[in-house]
Image (cartoon, rainbow, N blue to C red):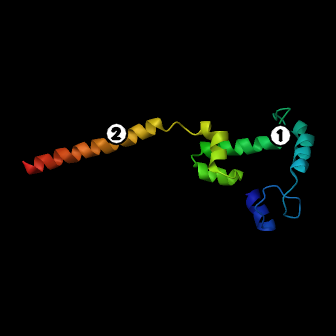
Amino acid sequence: MQLSVAVAQWGSEHMVTNGLGGPSSPWAIERAIRSTRRTVDGLPEGFRFHDLRHYLAILLIGSGLDVKVVQSRLRHASASTTLDCYGHMWPDADESARAAVGAVLAARADSLRTNDRVLR
């Protein structure tokens, strides 16, 4: 909700702005995080703003989004960068692939049996 309000107000594609709708300096964000992190219960001592990017990536991947969507949200130059960083986070697709091939082969076998009965 707050992100939608910020986008409506500033019309910016930046999640964190400089107060005028432009991008905030990464160092300004990091300084704000460092000064605030000790006041947030449960936040690790070494927490950095960049950790939020990793959290976002894992959240998106865990929600089933594909690599191109995650790439776009993280603003990676290529899907290869996204896969190099987070490829291990996507679920193993081997079982899904085996199930898909098995379903097609089973349907084909059923179709052949049906056709064979019709021809007799």
Reading the image, the residue beneath label 2 is: 102
Q: Position of residue 65 (x, y in %)?
A: 58, 49
Image spot of residue 12 (x, y percent)? 78, 64
Count residues near mark 1 (Cα–Cα under 10 Å), then give few for <14, some for 14-19, many for 20+.
Answer: some
Side (left or right) of 21 relative to 94: right
Q: Residue at x 77, y 40 (%)?
A: 51
Q: Nearer the viewer, residue 23 or 1?
A: 23
Whole-angstrom CA distance, mark 1 to mark 2, is: 46 Å
Q: Residue at x 71, y 53 (%)?
A: 75
Please indicate whether residue 89 sits to the left or right of residue 14 in the image: left
Say the numbered circle drawn on residue 48.
Answer: 1
- State the residue lying farthest toward the left: 120
Q: Residue at x 66, y 54 (%)?
A: 72
User: Which quarter shows the N terminus?
Assistant: bottom right
Residue 98 percent across, percent down from the top left? 40, 37
Question: Label 1 is placed on what type of residue?
Answer: Arg
Q: Secondary structure at mark 1?
A: loop
Position in image of residue 59 (x %, y %): 66, 44
| Tag of residue 66 | none
